[in-house]
Amino acid sequence: MHAFITGAGGFIGSHLVDLLIQQNHTVTAMLKPGEDDEFVHPDARRVVGDINDLGSMARAMPQADTVYHLAARSDLNSSAVAAYSTNTTGTSNVLEAARRACIRRFVYYSSMLSAAMPPDEQPVDETFHRPAETAYGQSKHLAEEIVRQSSLPWTIIRPTFVFGPRERTTTHAMFRAISKKRFVLIGPDAPQSFVYVKNLVEATYQASLHPDAQDETFFISDARPYALAEFAGKAAQAMGKKLPGFRLPVPGAMALAYLLKAVSAVTGVPAPLFPSRVRTMTRPYVYSIEKAKRLFNYNPPYSLEDALAETIQWYRRQNML
């Protein structure tokens, strides 16, 4: 197989490149102009392209068998869907370039946020269609519809909360806080769906090959949900640390988060805690992977303990804890 990957220099994309090369496939990794390729496997062919420019995309894309489209604007900083045109117009451009290249499967990376967060602790599956709560999620939902309406064979992957080596924002901040004994649990436990990045790319690879995964959408997470206390507690164990024995009540944590947000707005220093983070840490969100198990035999190879051990070791080698 010859695979073409957008977003190949990113956290998830670089792991997908690694896996495909380990499986002896030819990989063309697309990078943005000026993007660092530090984590891109040396055996990958590198091209430069801009998904916001159809001409650029068409020039960058070779005659590949499979396109994995991961490039996106993924922050939650804007409340305007139009601000996320990279996710909509960009996806249209990648699809058109893929059509011209006569690819056999188009694999699109969406998000669990393409629909509303689950209303309670009961797992939701791919039939759950409540509207997305954020502009980012709405843009991902629109992009999914663009993919579904294309003439190409497609598969849509909706990762849950992704962690692992090379992640340098949310979970890295959590692990760093745990390492420095600055992490505190908030409120009661709630089950949440996490996915280790190597479980995620394995599922992506298997789905891209399986005929029953064509023209289907899949939530992908680890084998079971975790309470944040379990996830953070086992991360602490992997570092030889312990979590504090107390928890902040939700109202107190939210008041502190708004205060820190105000201070950050004045000083420009990123806040270690903000209101949306408090909400995310304290609400349940559980997604079913039964469809992936049934249609392409998804069986996450990494346990939480092994995943966290690898992740912590990587952060230590990078002097990031």
Image (tube, rainbow, N blue to C red):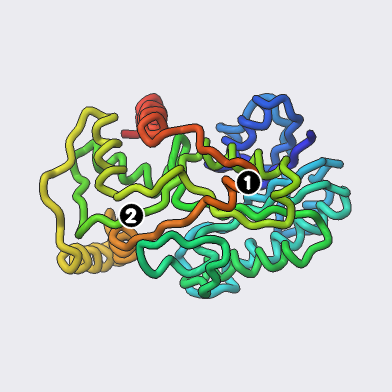
288 relative to 22 in the view: left or right: left
Image coords of residue 71 (percent x, y): 63, 51
Q: How crowded is mark 1: few (under 14 residues within 10 Å), some or many (20 or more)?
A: many
Of callouts 2 and 1, the N-terminal one: 1
Query: At 72% from the left edge and 66% from the top edge, which residue is drawn?
Result: 146
Image coords of residue 109 (percent x, y): 62, 53
Considering the numbered disc 1 on the image, is that residue within a helix, a strand or a loop? loop
5 relative to 237 in the view: left or right: right
Q: Residues within 10 Å of mark 2 (few under 14, many from 20)?
A: many
Give the CA distance from mark 2 to mark 1: 30 Å
Q: In which quarter of the image is residue 259?
A: bottom left
86 relative to 177 in the view: left or right: right
The amino acid at mark 2 is Pro
Q: Quadrant of the N terminus?
A: top right
Residue 173 seen by the camera: yes
Q: 11 above or below 281? A: above
Give the residue at the far left of this rendering.
245
Camera-nearest residue between 275 and 259: 275
Residue 274's disc number: none
Residue 191's disc number: 2
Residue 33 seen by the camera: no
The amino acid at mark 1 is Gly
Image coords of residue 164 (percent x, y): 44, 38
Q: Quadrant of residue 144?
A: bottom right
Mark 1 lies on residue: 7
Q: 12 above or below 275? A: above
Query: At 30% from the left edge and 66% from the top edge, which residue is drawn?
Result: 275
Considering the numbered disc 2 on the image, is that residue within a helix, a strand or a loop? strand
Camera-nearest residue between 137 and 295: 295
Q: 27 above or below 296? A: above
Query: At 28% from the left edge and 60% from the top edge, which residue is drawn?
Result: 282
Q: In which quarter of the image is residue 148?
A: bottom right
